[in-house]
Amino acid sequence: MTETYERGAGSRGVQQRGARVWCAALLAAVTIARGALAQDSVAESAPLPRTAESTAESTAESTAENTAAAEPTAAQRETARAWVLEGRRAFVEGDHLGALQRVVAAYQLVKAPTVGIEVARAQQALGQWVEANATAVEVINLPRAEGEP
């Protein structure tokens, strides 16, 4: 009763599932390690900047450039929070590309780990496994703020 393992269409599905499980586990670990963004509600939604129209290709370039950016203002944080909430709503509604655009815009404005995780989740939902992994690694390597757990 020995079975031989043949590489074929079935093995590819197993590999893809394994990659999804690994990425989901990594995202969960990062989320737990860095804390979750509080579920705030914002009365008004801010308009998206022009850069939000770009897709995930520009994410890696822009995030690498802005890792050592200055501390964002209160207005920038509020705008980013609004975009993240809009992105979450879009994600729940199944509009993963729209969600990615909104959270990328927020992440470019405010380099917060919780926003980076939202970017990685949207990338993962779109099947952009390499980009999601790179974003998660970037979030892990973000400098910690004073007093952050």
Image (cartoon, helix red, strand yellow):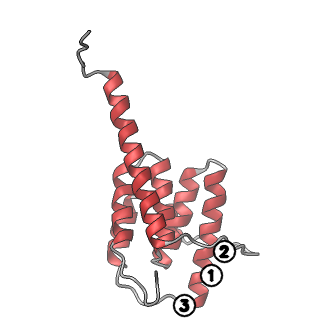
Counting residues from the start of the chain, the first of labels 1 and 2 encountered is 2
**The N terminus is located in which quarter?**
top left
Q: Quadrant of residue 3?
A: top left
**Where's residue 73, x and y in %?**
54, 90
Counting residues from the start of the chain, the first of labels 3 and 1 encountered is 3
Badge 2 is on which residue?
46
The Cα–Cα distance between marks 3 and 1, rounded to whole angstroms, is 9 Å
Q: Secondary structure at mark 1?
A: helix
Callout 1 amino acid:
Glu
Labels 1, 2: front one: 1
Q: Quadrant of residue 9?
A: top left
Callout 2 amino acid:
Ala
**Where's residue 55, x and y in %?**
45, 58
Q: Residue furthest top?
A: 1
Determine the residue positioned at 39% across, 82% down: 144
Q: Residue furthest right?
A: 43
Q: Secondary structure at mark 2?
A: loop
Callout 3 amino acid:
Thr
Labels 2, 3: front one: 3
